[in-house]
Image: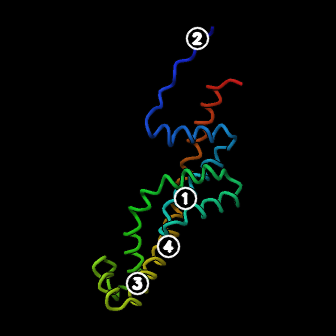
């Protein structure tokens, strides 16, 4: 009877949820530029200031550009905690941007008061804040995506080269 291999330790959360899925994607035949593009698009898409649209946006983009849909979804959904962190500041800046510095400030107290007394103004403020947040996101995500793409391409080349050396065919 052959001795069985010792069970592998599950590793920490970062390794199981991030490193191992990226390695598995590398094994599926994505080239380093494709993987860098997936990350460079998935990270900004995960930060979009509209809750609930990340999956649709990432899936559509991955299919349209013929990238790995699963990889794009993993990357974009790993950004969810950061999306929640930047949502309120982007909306506040968006309200200022499209409000020309006039009108009510975007705070919980101000929104509560507006909803009690003039709900149409409250909805207008939220609409303006959301639209301004999306405009700011577009403007900021373009340089972020370019920076990530050109920074990650050599990293993934090295990872792929190291992986092919470590795994003989």
Question: Dot 1, how many residues are within 10 Å of its Cα: few (below 14), some (14-19), or many (20+)?
Answer: many
Given contact means CB atoms under 8 Å apart, are the residues at marks 4 and 3 in contact?
no
Mark 4 to mark 3 CA distance (whole Å):
14 Å
Q: How many marks?
A: 4
Give the quarter of the figure containing the C terminus: top right
Q: Which is nearer the N-term, disc 4 or disc 3?
A: 3
Q: Secondary structure at mark 1?
A: helix
Mark 2 to mark 4 CA distance (whole Å):
58 Å
Q: Which is nearer the N-term, disc 3 or disc 1?
A: 3
Front of the two marks 4 and 3: 3
| Observer-nearest of 154 and 64 | 64
Given contact means CB atoms under 8 Å apart, are the residues at marks 2 and 4 in contact?
no
Mark 3 to mark 1 CA distance (whole Å):
29 Å
Mark 1 to mark 4 CA distance (whole Å):
16 Å
Quadrant of res 85: bottom left
Front of the two marks 3 and 1: 3
Residue underneath mark 4? 134
Given contact means CB atoms under 8 Å apart, are the residues at marks 3 and 1 in contact?
no
Q: Residue furthest front?
A: 1
Residue underneath mark 2? 3
At horizontal 61% and vertical 38% (from top left) the residue drawn is: 24
Residue underneath mark 3? 125
Q: Which is nearer the N-term, disc 2 or disc 1?
A: 2
Residue underneath mark 1? 145
Q: Position of residue 145 (x, y in %)?
A: 55, 58
| Observer-nearest of 142 and 96 | 96
């Amino acid at each position: 009877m052959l001795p069985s291999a010792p069970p592998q330790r599950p590793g920490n959360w970062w390794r199981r949820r991030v490193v191992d899925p990226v390695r598995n994607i590398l094994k599926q035949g994505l080239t380093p530029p494709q993987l860098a593009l997936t990350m460079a698009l998935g990270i900004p898409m995960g930060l979009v200031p509209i809750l609930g649209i990340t999956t649709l946006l990432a899936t559509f983009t991955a299919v349209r550009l013929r990238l790995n849909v699963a990889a794009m979804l993993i990357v974009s959904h790993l950004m969810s905690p950061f999306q929640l962190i930047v949502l309120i500041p982007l909306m506040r800046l968006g309200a200022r941007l499209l409000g020309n510095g006039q009108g009510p400030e975007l705070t919980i107290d101000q929104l509560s008061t507006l909803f009690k007394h003039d709900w149409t103004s409250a909805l207008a403020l939220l609409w303006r804040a959301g639209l301004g947040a999306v405009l700011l996101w577009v403007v900021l995500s373009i340089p972020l995506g370019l920076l990530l793409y050109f920074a990650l391409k050599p990293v993934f080349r090295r990872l792929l080269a190291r992986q092919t050396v470590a795994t003989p065919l």
